[in-house]
Image: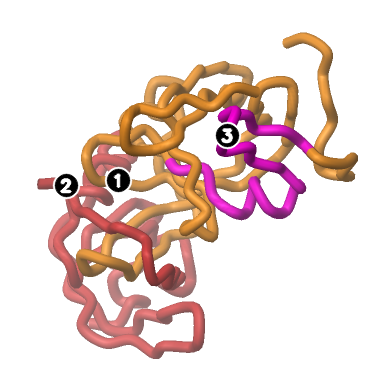
Chain colours: A red, B orange
Amino acid sequence: MKWQKVRDLFPDQFVLVSILDYTEKYDKKIVHEVSPIRSIPDNEANKELFRSEPGTIVYHTANEECIIHIRRDPFRKVERVQ
Amino acid sequence: MNLQFDGELLTVSITVIFRGSLLHIDNVIIDTGSSHTILTPDVLETIGVIYENGDPVYEAYGIGGSAPFYTKVMDELRIGPYVLTNHKIDVGILPKHHNGLLGLDILMHNGFMIDFHQLILEHSHQSSLMKKKSSF
């Protein structure tokens, strides 16, 4: 569903969503289509963000747009929570 | 400012201040291969640094795939006698449970010099971003 629909269904809170479609503009992704997984309490957003699987993100629905910035460092060693 | 060598990498101790809380962080790796400074969420959580609405969210693409992180402005970041105010850092998971990486955003843009022979980190000139405190 559209990010706007998620904002209507889960107003003013963090949600964990699967990213279905986005537009990439140089240094950021503007996410248009998502599939909501669940809402996340404020005090769990930190933990859930770092636990999120590739292709998902924790984002707050107070934001009109869902924007994920992109950082490309060729030698940055990235790791997700095991 | 003395650097430590743990047998593999060069590290330094730093202090961060966030919303009035102060935290010493040891074993921050000097990393000229990082464009930005990153500190781990586990360590920062102890002084209330958590992901909040309004914090820019990022995906980092590097060796190992991609990983999420967010950025947060630290009221102060101190390296020895040198103090940066309102400095934005990355908050993200690092491999091998390292506490952090000190990147070029701090090292180069503030004119630090690294003496690899004596293992000293020195500030080479006055910068508008930095002020030297005689004690802290």
Q: Position of residue A69 (x, y in %)?
A: 46, 70
Residue type at mark 2: give it.
Answer: Val
Residue B54 visible at all:
no
In the rendered structure, the answer to whether residue A7 lies left or right of residue B66 reads right
Q: Of B82 and B48, which appears nearest the observer? A: B82
- Distance from disc 1 to disc 3, alpha carbons, whole Å, reads 31 Å
Q: Chain of mark 1?
A: B
Circle 2: element type = loop
Residue B45 position (above or below residue B67): above
Query: In this rendering, which labeled residue sits more in front, label 1 or label 3?
Result: 3
Residue A33 visible at all:
yes
The residue that label 2 is drawn on is A81
| Residue plotted at (76% across, 48% down) | B111
| Residue plotted at (73% across, 35% down) | B84
| Residue plotted at (24% across, 40% down) | A47
Look at the image and give the residue range highlighted in magenta: B101-123
If the image is split into quadrants, where does the C terminus of chain B sit?
A: top right
Q: Chain of mark 2?
A: A
The answer to whether marks 2 and 1 sit on the same chain is: no
